[in-house]
Amino acid sequence: MNASTTQVIGLELDEHSYDINVKNGLRDDLAEILAPWNHGQQWVVLTQQAIFDLYEPVIEQLRSAGYKLGTIIVPGDESAKNIRHAEDVWSKMVEMGCDRSSVLLALGGGVVGDLGGFVAATYMRGIPFIQVPTTLLAMIDSAIGGKTAVNLAAGKNLVGAIYQPKAVLVDPGFLQTLPRRNVISSLAEAIKYGFIRDKSIFDTMDTRFDDLVSLNDDALLSDVIAKSCRIKAQIVSNDQFENGERRLLNYGHTIGHAFETIQAYGGLYHGEAVLYGMKCANFISHRKGLLSSAEYELAQSVLHRFELPELGAVPPEKVLEVVSHDKKNINGKLNFILIDQIGNGLVNTEVTAEDIVESLRAVA
């Protein structure tokens, strides 16, 4: 596949359907791509300072093309996903004169996309928004599917809405400025798809890990991004509101989110927490007799290639407390995602507190 070719991946949701466009250099054509949504109304670019400093020419390109544009800067870390920051963004949009025709452009990683989507879903009961993700994590996961949210002290993403963007515009070229730690963290969501749906992604991680992390093969990177986007789009198209199949996307996240919550979103990156969560999920899958010893060892050996900081203090009782508040709990049952082979995820409601505690001992 030519990395400069535009790949268009449709996400089918009737009147809420939209396209995911993947192309190197796509940001150079942003004014033209966004033209169908531009009718002279006020636009808002929601971003963070580091992204603005790097890509101000992308924003200026839109102004030069006649877009009426304002910029709002939010913190560059998980602290931005807070109701107080959402209120600040709403207030600034009022000052800018935004109305129901205004469009919010989320230019950044998952934090900006989640907050931007939540703001768009709630401002004047809903305005259009478009995702322009600048991190690998956002490109292959958080920008797709319409999950928007802010955090509470009790847990991650507990207040939000399912609100679909009008488009997701993916330019892998944005990734060249990412530090290695961010790339490794972001690849967590890609290998997740390999575990739950497409073993070829897992195999690529196994055989081409160094090439992916170093970002030195544009075609390889674009291929992994496009495969991941297709899987996410297909699952969301089948189950927008997470009543069944979409729960598979939570593989590694139940315990991973607990790690983030315990560390007050200030220690591990999201993908790093999820990678630890995957190790736990694989341990439990093997413990319950679902995953063979050979596949378990292979799965953990590939996950061990990801450079991770120390997990730190995660008291089992705190993990269990956070997991008990997880959104995936339904009627007192935890819908935990396990695998019975690499490439096939499943929902399991029989994971016990003992299973979780034992998995923590195994990966700590």
Image (tube, rainbow, N blue to C red):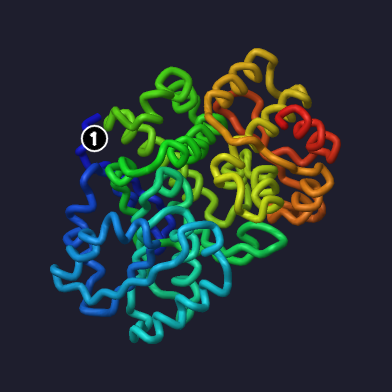
Query: Residue 147 in the image: x percent, y percent?
Result: 52, 58
Query: Residue 174 in the image: x percent, y percent?
Result: 30, 46
Q: Nearer the viewer, residue 304 or 300?
A: 304
Residue 153 shows in the view:
yes
Residue 90 versus residue 258 in the image, above or below: below
Q: Nearer the viewer, residue 335 or 316?
A: 316
**Residue at the image point whose x is 39% and y is 64% from the top:** 15
**Residue at the image point whose x is 68% and y is 53% from the top:** 261
Query: Residue 203 in the image: x percent, y percent?
Result: 47, 21
Query: Residue 227 in the image: x percent, y percent?
Result: 39, 35
**Residue at the image point whose x is 18% and y is 53% from the top:** 28
Residue 230 shows in the view:
no
Residue tagged 1: 3
**Residue at the image point whose x is 62% and y is 39% from the top:** 251
Looking at the rendered structure, the kind of residue marked 1 is Ala
Task: Give the residue furthest to the top.
Answer: 294
Relative to 20, is 157 on the left or the right? right
Residue 207 versus residue 344 in the image, above or below: above
Quadrant containing the N terminus in the rendered view: top left
Q: Secondary structure at mark 1?
A: loop
Relative to 26, is 14 on the left or the right? right
Crowdedness near tag 1: few (<14), some (14–19) or many (≥20) residues, C-alpha within 10 Å:
some
Q: Quadrant of residue 42?
A: bottom left
Quadrant containing the C terminus in the rendered view: top right
